[in-house]
Image (cartoon, rainbow, N blue to C red):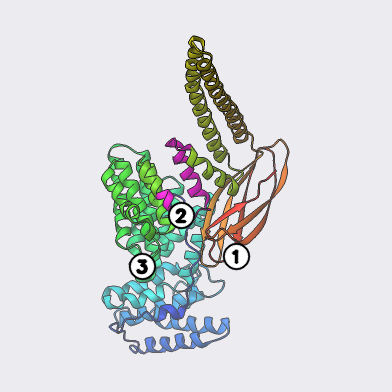
Amino acid sequence: MPAVGRNAVLPALLVATVATFAGAQQKACEIDENTPNQVARAVLQLQLASSASKPEDVASKLREAVKLVADLDKSRNPVGRSWVLGRALVLWMAQPNIGPTPKRGTLGYTTNPDAPIDLVAAIDSAFTVIETQNPECVSTTAGWRQQKGWVEMINSAIEMANSPDSAKVDSSVVLARRSLELFRGAPYGYMVLAQASAKRSHIKEAIGYYKQAVDAAKDTTFADVRRQMLLTLGSMAADAAEQASGADKTAYLKESKDAFDALAKDPGTKYADYARSGQARVALITGDTASLKGSYAEQLANPSAYSYNSLMQAAVSAARASQNADAIKLFEAAYKVNPYHRDVLYNLARLYMLGAEYAKGMPVVKQLIAVDPANPDNYQLYAIGWAAFQKDYIAKQKHYDSTAKVYGNKANTAKGATVQKAYIDSAAKVNSVIKAYADSAAKAVDSALKYNDLMQKLPVKIVFTEFTASDTKTNLAGTLTNSGAADKSYTLKIEFLDKSGSVVATADVPVGPVKAGASAQFSAVGNAPGIVAFRYAPLQ
């Protein structure tokens, strides 16, 4: 599942090449590269620089190109002059050991050669001249704005933004702002600023940046990025709405609803379920039961047409709204698709218990513990079930106690030996039933106490934080807590399952040593297609 919420991880580093962007020119953009002659000569120097193989030769040609046009009369073909200068500076930015503020003379400027020059600002200034006078050239300059220097800035900003180090996050903000000065037509700089604001709990500011990221991601190449941003924006605003009140709550809910509605209109192939789930969440917060039920009506009416994930998200929406009958139907449908996944097993068992359907719930709990034996919540379900059975056995025992007393009284007042014996025999049979229920009640109490004790005293507890399946592999991650009194190392033996329950991949994951009372994170990869669930062996 895609990352969502206040600390969503930004996408992987970008991959871009000069050739990719150079091919983005519009035919309508016409720039005079021949007048005055200094412009034409500078164009030749750029061509020579592009074909040079040695860094020193590239630098020499770029320096000559800048020298030819830097001090040229700006009234003489300002667009042609700026076109050559801007491209020369872009190529300079990609050269080794240049940095963001080299000396002017290093680049070929003859005036104030020892003064520093801000390369980003100079490139932006040059291309802005072209874009202002020739708006049809915006896509042409955009290709050059997004060259290697911009890509490296964005990549560094993304890497720093994902760091837990606050100083690196601060640096990511600086780089993101610089990247936006160079090019505002991509979402990545705004995404970095949004994540940094979210990490600082500046939620309104973060929402604003995510909206700018969505606006910047209009090109079809950014389609899934735009959808991810809408999902993140909607989830963040919903989180904020749940903590807010008054006008702030209303505003956050509107932001969330707008984001999820926009995602629902263009979900692509991956985001339809997320959009429906988000819409259901907004409806739940606002108390709009009709809209909430409408968000999963299709899955409820025709569950066989939907995937496991779709049914699970619909079921969770119904459960959160206390629409337990609908939730059970949807969880049961998800169970039919994937009866081995711990999430559907836990949720279905829990709702059975809440609905006092203990006979249905207990077998599901047994399945759950078989795949997830180190989760105390699972044993709590068993304890609840056995306690409910004990209560039921006692109620039945009391019922038969009354019946036995009736038979006893009738035996005591019977006038004939035959009739008296019949009542005595009936009372004996009832007493045997009473004893059976008493024994069952005692066993149920023992079992309830056993699983309650297990729940509280599990020596190792495991919580899973990721289960992400792709076409060829599945990533699994979680946290292991050592609840014992001594430091210990563990080996987590994991089996990855396909839809038939067959083991298609395994992983032995060493964890630790883990200090007593402490936790450690772990991760595993199942390298096989078709993985839909997993299980692991009990840890001693």
User: Toward which corner of the image does residue 39 lie, by quadrant?
Assistant: bottom left
Q: In this view, does 137 lie to the left or right of 7?
A: left
Q: 401 or 159, which is in the foreground?
A: 401
Which dot, 1 or 2, sits closer to the camera? 2
> Mark 2 to mark 3: distance in Å?
46 Å
From the image, tell me which residue sits under label 2: 336
- Magenta span of residues: 330-358
- Label 1 packing within 10 angstroms: few (<14), some (14-19), many (20+): some
Marked residue nearer the N-terminal end (1 or 3): 3
> Mark 1 to mark 2: distance in Å?
25 Å
The residue lying at 36 percent from left, 76 percent from top is 141
Q: What residue type is labelled 3?
A: Gly
Q: Which amino acid does label 2 sit on?
A: Lys
Marked residue nearer the N-terminal end (2 or 3): 3
Whether 332 is among the magenta residues is yes
From the image, tell me which residue sits under label 1: 527
Which dot, 2 or 3, sits closer to the camera? 2
Q: Which amino acid does label 1 sit on?
A: Asn
Marked residue nearer the N-terminal end (1 or 2): 2
From the image, tell me which residue sits under label 3: 185
Q: 42 or 204, which is in the foreground?
A: 204
